[in-house]
Amino acid sequence: MTLLADLSDRARAAASDAVGPVLAEAARHVLDTAACVASGSTHPLAARWVPLLPASPGGVAALGAAGAWAVATAVEIDATLAHVDEFDALHGPAAVAPGAVVVPAALHVGRAVGAGGADVLRAVVAGYEAVAEASLRFGGPALYAAGWWPTALFGALGAAAATALLLDLDGPTTTTALALAAAPLGGLLSTDELGDAHYLLCGRAAAHGVGSAQ
């Protein structure tokens, strides 16, 4: 079994096995992350950065910024603002900030597909499992010594796992979603699942560079 398939299985199993106490803890993380977004919305970065993002008339509302946005942009806004004050939850052993990357994805995708509260909470559980386990497999806090931030490396895996659950993707398709999420790492986790993502990386890298300079 590839690492990606293992992460997919673990995330799906964690969500399936989640019972009352686990879902209650997930709900507390949702509330905590939402409060962090509210705090982050007053950070100076928000005033400088949010106006640069593309609005989407008829789109969705973000928690942390007025306006209408594409779902992916709303996730980006709320994930950024959730962490900008660094009040959000940290998974110490994995050295990741799971709430910032998973909760906005679960909330916005859950709203888009009309998911119930319990399904959103299970998506949060799945996302936490994926991002924390991936970081643990590659050293967690030790990554800092090499100059890598684990949340940036593996956060997309958490958001992908949460989204895959809400979209009711099966195991193999979830594995492919995780592979696409990992593709910006250059194939570190992708093995033979890299596929078309390999060709998209040049364009994304170039666009990200332009956006960074802007």
Image: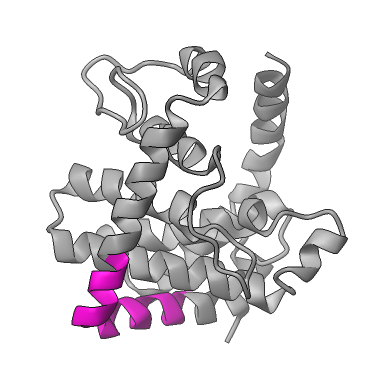
Asked if the stretch drawn in magenta spans residue 17, the answer is yes
**In this picture, residue 134 sits left or right of residue 175:** right
Q: Residue at x 34, y 28 (%)?
A: 70
Asked if the stretch drawn in magenta spans residue 103, the answer is no
Q: Which residue is drawn at 60% across and 81% down?
A: 2
Please say whether residue 168 is visible from this viewpoint. no
Q: Position of residue 37 (x, y in %)?
A: 40, 38
Is 194 rendered above or below residue 78?
A: below
Which span of residues is magenta-colored?
A: 8-26
Q: Residue at x 28, y 85 (%)?
A: 17
Q: Which of 7 and 135 is in front in this view?
A: 135
Is 206 rendered above or below residue 75?
A: above
Quarter of the image with the N terminus is bottom right
Is 140 rendered above or below residue 10?
A: above
Q: Position of residue 48 (x, y in %)?
A: 56, 14
Q: Which of 147 and 171 is in front in this view?
A: 147
